[in-house]
Image (cartoon, rainbow, N blue to C red):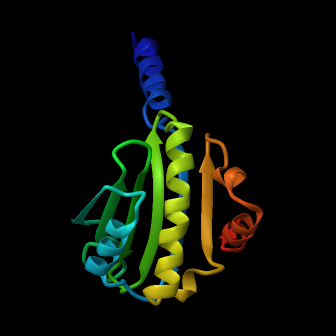
């Protein structure tokens, strides 16, 4: 009986916590939050996007040697064409005031359709370029970390000039 209990406990450890994340993401640190209502309006102006939703949430509360800190502030903008474009733009400000930017299209334990990846990727790049050029986040250029997990790399569909731009702004 004791052996069976140990086996079941070990088996539950292997089964739990085995979630896989599939999809694409891009991210970098920024010096500040952009004007989020203006960013929302810009995304709404894209012909590839039909609907944009904005919301805020509390993130983690870091524990440091000086105590529990203020919860991170997390800001989300999700955008869709209600067909194949399904992106999320996220900014997170921690208790020290440091801001991170990310965009992603990910699914947990299942691969998002490649058509979603291929349709969303150009919108991500367009939005990132707007953040750099029009919203004062020039530090994103050359600092973006790109992750492609379990799906085909969407860069394969870009014209050669855009591939160079996408790769030049990533750390692989």
Image location of residue 84, percent across then percent down:
44, 44
Residue 91 appearing in the image: yes
Query: In the picture, which quadrant includes the N terminus?
Result: top left
Q: Is residue 15 above or below residue 5?
A: below
Image location of residue 110, percent across then percent down:
48, 33
- Residue found 55% across the figure and 56% down from its top: 121
Residue 68 appearing in the image: no
Question: Total number of numbered labels?
Answer: 0
- Residue found 48% across the figure and 78% down from its top: 130
- Residue found 57% across the figure and 48% down from its top: 118
Query: In the picture, which quadrant includes the C terminus?
Result: bottom right
Looking at this view, name the residue that lies furthest to the front.
47
Q: Is residue 115 above or below residue 55?
A: above
Q: Is residue 129 left or right of residue 78?
A: right
Q: Of 34 and 6, which appears nearest the observer? A: 34
Image location of residue 150, percent across then percent down:
61, 40
- Residue found 36% across the figure and 50% down from its top: 81
The picture quadrant where one finds residue 35 is bottom left
Looking at this view, name the residue that lies furthest to the top.
1
Q: Is residue 6 above or below residue 66?
A: above
Image location of residue 47, percent across then percent down:
40, 61
């Amino acid at each position: 009986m004791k052996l069976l209990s140990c086996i079941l406990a070990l088996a539950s450890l292997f089964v739990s916590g085995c979630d896989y994340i599939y999809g694409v993401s891009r991210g970098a640190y920024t010096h500040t939050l952009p004007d989020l209502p203006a960013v929302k309006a810009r995304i709404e102006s894209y012909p590839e996007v039909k609907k944009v939703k904005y919301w805020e949430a509390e993130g983690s509360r870091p524990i440091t040697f000086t105590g529990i800190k203020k919860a991170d502030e997390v800001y989300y903008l999700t955008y869709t064409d209600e067909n194949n474009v399904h992106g999320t733009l996220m900014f997170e400000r921690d208790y020290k005031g440091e801001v991170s930017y990310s965009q992603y299209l990910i699914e947990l334990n299942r691969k998002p359709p490649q058509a979603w990846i291929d349709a969303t990727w150009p919108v991500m790049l367009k939005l990132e370029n707007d953040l750099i050029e029009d919203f004062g986040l020039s530090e994103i250029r050359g600092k973006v970390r790109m992750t492609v997990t379990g799906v085909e790399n969407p860069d394969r569909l870009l014209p050669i000039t855009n591939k160079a731009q996408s790769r030049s702004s990533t750390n692989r």
